[in-house]
């Protein structure tokens, strides 16, 4: 439950610190005083969306912080999932900047808005005025039945399996679409692959062939250059290079004994002689290897033409990209060949998950059916206490073949406020006051099954008065015996049932209007309830009636 609430710079609230208690906490105040603002601030702690408009004029940030007592509510697994420090006393803080940015903390550790919402749903159930419209909503109606059937765990298991069903179905559909597209292209892909495979391409082949082509195409010119080079080095002429080097070497050696420098040069000449002799032998060998072979040139050019044609066809440059394309086509064709098996595997997995989901859905349906009559009787009993003795309620569950978000059931509440009235959907036949009473009956029933620490009602008693209001107050008082109830009301009969009474009002501070809330003393409660009774000047009679209401 909420033990303390701190609000700073939120809309019209300048600074507010309030302590709530266990049991029924009543909040009253004049219309427009800011009761809904207080409710909105608490909503921020349950993950409600916020923007810069909630920051009080002139402030840069607003802060909403509450301390919760959460022992016995089994929140440890949730805290472990979110890697948060658990303690029986939990502090939730929300900070919103004038730029519209929001930060959330639980026990001083940052959390995402989704995590805050998940935790908040386990702490507080807020019923605002517009939520009475939910009575006609199938999701809310199913939530009522699931709450009484205590289906939370089973619903979690069902939704987990349903999520897997959707994921596998998506994979199966994607695989089938990919296969269909691949099969539309299969003939062309197979033709491309066979053409590339037949080419027997090798990495680096193109560059090697181009080098060979250059040699074969210019063989005559190359041989002439090689022959003439060999002739100059070691030909028949007496003045060829090697013969001349020998003569130079011999001449220098004859005087080398007189000069060490000359001896060194003679040695270098000798080395050059042998180096050039090796060069001459290599040139001669190359000359013998190279031949003007038109057939080999034609073979090389034919091979290059095939590579060039494939490059142009596939818009790539080089043999390596062609090899990559060949391997890619091979993989795609292998995928096509094996896709039927893969889709069959996914179909089998999907069928197994679907059967599992249907089995859980069947169990959900059975549990729902088992509590329908109990809900009907309990709600009608409470409505009878609230002055609707002739009310009738029918809860119709229908099975479908679909796997819906909450199982395979659809639901519809049919209602008549009067014994002889025609049963219709709630939104068609219930007045505002009747819907308020019906919503309270349902919320009261749900609260007895759902272990929420705090339930907040925002004027759920709209449209009722007199003895009915008194009975609604009694129901809330009973609810407050087991948990914390915070109820915003305009009815004195309901306000008098509270164990604690808070009053909201506007005040001027530093030239600005601010919203203030404070807990009333016993004497102040008498005056405020008397005001609610008299609707004008507080009389002694109104005070006596207020004391009588409080005395009950």
Image (spheres, grey):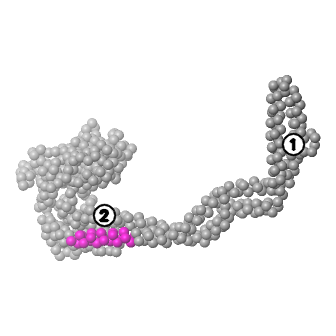
* Element at label 2: helix
Instruction: Look at the image and say whether residue 365 sits in the magenta stretch.
Output: yes
Q: Is residue 309 above or below residue 521?
A: below
**Residue occupying image coordinates x 45% and y 65%:** 171
Q: Is residue 362 above or below residue 224?
A: below
* Element at label 1: helix
Q: Position of residue 13 (x, y in %)?
A: 27, 43
Residue hosting label 1: 233
Q: Is residue 144 above or below residue 108?
A: below
**Residue occupying image coordinates x 15% and y 52%:** 23
Q: Residue furthest top?
A: 258
Region in magenta: 350-370
Please state which of the two labelled residues, at mark 1 or mark 2, is closer to the viewer: 1
Q: Is residue 129 left or right of residue 267?
A: left
Q: Which mark is residue 157?
A: 2
Callout 2 crowding tier (Cα within 10 Å): few <14, some 14–19, many ≥20: some
Q: Is residue 203 left or right of residue 523?
A: right
Q: Position of residue 53 (x, y in %)?
A: 35, 47
Q: Is residue 20 above or below residue 262?
A: below
Q: Earlier along the polypeptide chain: callout 1 or callout 2?
A: 2
Q: Position of residue 378 (x, y in %)?
A: 16, 67
Closest to the observer: 19 or 111?
111
């Amino acid at each position: 439950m909420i033990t303390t609430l701190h609000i700073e710079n939120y809309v019209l609230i300048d600074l507010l610190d309030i302590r709530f208690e266990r049991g029924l906490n009543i909040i009253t105040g004049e219309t427009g005083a800011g009761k809904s603002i207080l409710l909105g601030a608490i909503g921020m702690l349950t993950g409600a969306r916020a923007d810069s408009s909630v920051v009080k004029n002139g402030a840069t940030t607003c802060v909403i912080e509450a301390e919760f007592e959460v022992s016995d509510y089994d929140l440890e697994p949730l805290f472990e999932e979110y890697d948060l420090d658990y303690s029986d006393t939990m502090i939730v803080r929300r900070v919103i900047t004038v730029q519209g940015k929001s930060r959330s903390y639980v026990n001083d550790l940052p959390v995402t808005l989704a995590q805050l919402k998940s935790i908040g749903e386990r702490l507080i159930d807020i019923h605002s005025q517009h939520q009475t419209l939910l009575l006609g909503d199938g999701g809310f109606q199913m939530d009522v039945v699931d709450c009484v059937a205590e289906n939370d765990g089973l619903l979690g298991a069902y939704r987990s399996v349903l999520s897997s069903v959707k994921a596998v179905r998506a994979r199966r559909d994607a695989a089938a679409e990919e296969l269909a597209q691949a099969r539309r292209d299969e003939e062309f892909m197979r033709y491309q692959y066979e053409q590339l495979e037949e080419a027997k391409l090798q990495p680096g082949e193109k560059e090697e062939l181009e080098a060979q082509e250059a040699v074969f195409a210019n063989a005559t010119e190359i041989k002439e250059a090689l022959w003439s080079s060999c002739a100059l080095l070691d030909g028949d002429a007496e003045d060829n290079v090697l013969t001349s080097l020998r003569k130079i070497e011999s001449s220098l050696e004859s005087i080398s004994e007189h000069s060490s420098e000359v001896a060194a040069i003679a040695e270098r000449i000798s080395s050059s002689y042998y180096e050039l002799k090796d060069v001459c032998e290599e040139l001669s060998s190359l000359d013998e290897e190279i031949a003007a072979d038109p057939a080999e040139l034609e073979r090389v050019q034919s091979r290059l033409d095939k590579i060039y044609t494939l490059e142009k066809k596939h818009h790539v440059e080089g043999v390596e990209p062609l090899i990559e394309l060949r391997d890619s086509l091979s993989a795609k064709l292998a995928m096509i060949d094996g896709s039927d098996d893969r889709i069959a595997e996914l179909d089998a997995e999907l069928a197994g998950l679907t059967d599992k989901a249907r089995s859980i859905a069947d169990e959900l349906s059975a549990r729902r059916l088992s509590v329908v009559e109990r809900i009907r009787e309990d709600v009608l009993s409470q409505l009878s206490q609230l002055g609707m003795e002739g009310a009738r309620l029918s809860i119709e569950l229908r099975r479908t073949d679909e796997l819906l978000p909450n199982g395979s059931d659809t639901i519809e509440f049919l209602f008549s406020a009067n014994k002889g009235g025609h049963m219709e959907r709630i939104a068609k036949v219930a007045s505002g006051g009747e819907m308020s009473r019906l919503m309270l009956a349902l919320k009261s029933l749900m609260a007895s099954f759902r272990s929420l620490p705090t339930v907040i009602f925002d004027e759920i008693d709209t449209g009722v008065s007199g003895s009915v209001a008194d009975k609604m107050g009694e129901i809330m008082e009973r609810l407050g015996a087991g948990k914390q109830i915070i109820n915003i009301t305009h009815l004195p009969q309901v306000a008098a049932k509270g164990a604690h009474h808070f009053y909201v009002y506007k005040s001027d501070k530093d030239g600005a209007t601010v919203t203030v809330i404070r807990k009333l003393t016993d004497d102040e409660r008498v005056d405020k309830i008397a005001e609610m009774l008299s609707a004008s000047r507080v009389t002694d009679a109104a005070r006596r009636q207020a004391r009588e209401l409080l005395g009950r």
